[in-house]
């Protein structure tokens, strides 16, 4: 997906995803859904993956209403057999993947680090790191052997501002942050791999927050993000507009401190 930014090239052309196929995990709600619909509006066909097929099918209908093709797939990214099947299904249907977004995540709160069960630890690490590693490695190799592509890993501010009771999540996301450098070198130069470090956004999980957390935040922006505010960074990294951006770490967190 390399591109030469010729003088006078229009912004619409730089950000166009016409003819591209995107795969978004956790694509049925929250930030994932926003990115799925943004990619479709930019011209991409989309594979929508999450554990709940009906939810994927609902978003697929929204994509099709925008005039694009959609493939809903039920997959648990923490299980390698599901990841392998997801990749095979996507390539069998569309023949390629140009954009991969490792967005699916899991962040349950443990009573304490000492009381974190092995089952909870393994589940959190599997969804937040093991799955993206497997999916990125399989798709990255196919991209590198083909026409290239863009991989976007959705990380969390929890990795750089870790809090008690979130040790496995913070550690898994910190591990995820390293993959942009690993995969960027392994599958470059025609595969770009980047990380978005997402801060607090008003997704479904925010419904459990208190009023103070929903309206204020210790950040330069002073508030949580609206889900639509992930879109511009994701489009930049997915498109030819970011042809010289790879192995990068981009904070989209309103300036947390």
Image (cartoon, helix red, strand yellow):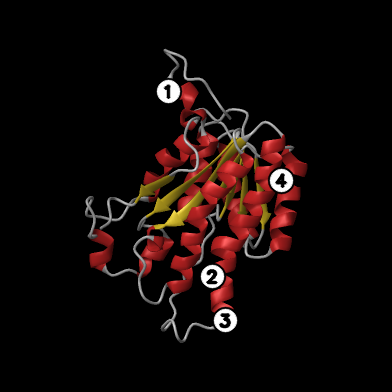
Q: Kindly identify the residue that appears in the image at 51 percent across and 60 percent down.
A: 175
Name the spot of residue 138 as percent of width and height, x first.
Answer: 69, 49
Residue beneath disc 1: 11
Name the spot of residue 63 as percent of width and height, x first.
Answer: 57, 41
Q: Secondary structure at mark 4?
A: helix
Q: Secondary structure at mark 2?
A: helix
| Mark toward the viewer: 1 or 2 | 2
Which of the two discs, 1 and 2, labels the residue nearer the N terminus? 1
Residue beneath disc 4: 90
Cα distance between the residues tagged 4 and 2: 25 Å
Q: Kindly identify the residue that appears in the image at 51 percent across and 34 percent down.
A: 41
Q: Kindly identify the residue that appears in the image at 35 percent across and 71 percent down.
A: 163
Asked if marks 4 and 2 touch (Cβ < 8 Å), the reply is no
Mark linked to residue 124:
2
Residue beneath disc 3: 118
Q: Kindly identify the residue that appears in the image at 70 percent across and 53 percent down.
A: 86
Which of the two discs, 3 and 2, labels the residue nearer the N terminus? 3
- Counting other residues with Cα less than 10 Å from the Cα at mark 3, is it few (<14), some (14-19), or many (20 or more)? few
Cα distance between the residues tagged 1 and 3: 49 Å
The foreground one among 227 and 5 is 5
Q: Is any atom of residue 225 visible in this view?
A: yes
Cα distance between the residues tagged 1 and 2: 39 Å
Q: Is any atom of residue 50 visible in this view?
A: no
Cα distance between the residues tagged 3 and 2: 10 Å
């Amino acid at each position: 997906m390399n591109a030469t930014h010729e003088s006078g090239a229009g912004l619409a052309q730089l950000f166009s995803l016409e003819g591209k196929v995107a795969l978004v995990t956790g694509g049925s709600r929250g930030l994932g859904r926003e990115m799925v619909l943004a990619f479709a509006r930019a011209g991409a066909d989309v594979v929508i993956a999450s554990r709940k097929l009906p939810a994927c099918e609902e978003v697929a209908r929204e994509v099709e209403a925008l005039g694009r093709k959609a493939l809903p797939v039920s997959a648990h990214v923490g299980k390698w057999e599901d990841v392998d099947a997801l990749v095979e299904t996507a390539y069998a249907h569309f023949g390629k993947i140009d954009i991969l977004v490792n967005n699916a995540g899991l962040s349950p709160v443990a009573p304490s680090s000492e009381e974190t069960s092995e089952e909870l630890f393994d589940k959190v690490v599997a969804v937040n790191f093991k799955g993206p590693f497997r999916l990125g490695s399989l798709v990255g190799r196919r991209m590198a052997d083909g026409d290239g592509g863009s991989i976007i890993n959705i990380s969390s501010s929890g990795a750089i501002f870790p809090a008690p009771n979130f040790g496995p999540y913070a550690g898994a996301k910190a591990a995820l942050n390293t993959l942009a450098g690993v995969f960027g070198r392994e599958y470059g130069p025609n595969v770009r791999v980047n990380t978005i470090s997402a801060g607090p956004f008003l997704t479904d999980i925010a419904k459990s927050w208190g009023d103070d957390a929903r309206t204020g935040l210790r950040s330069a922006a002073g508030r949580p993000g609206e889900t639509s505010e992930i879109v511009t960074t994701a489009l930049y990294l997915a498109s030819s507009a970011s042809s010289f951006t790879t192995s990068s770490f981009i904070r989209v967190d309103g300036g947390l401190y």
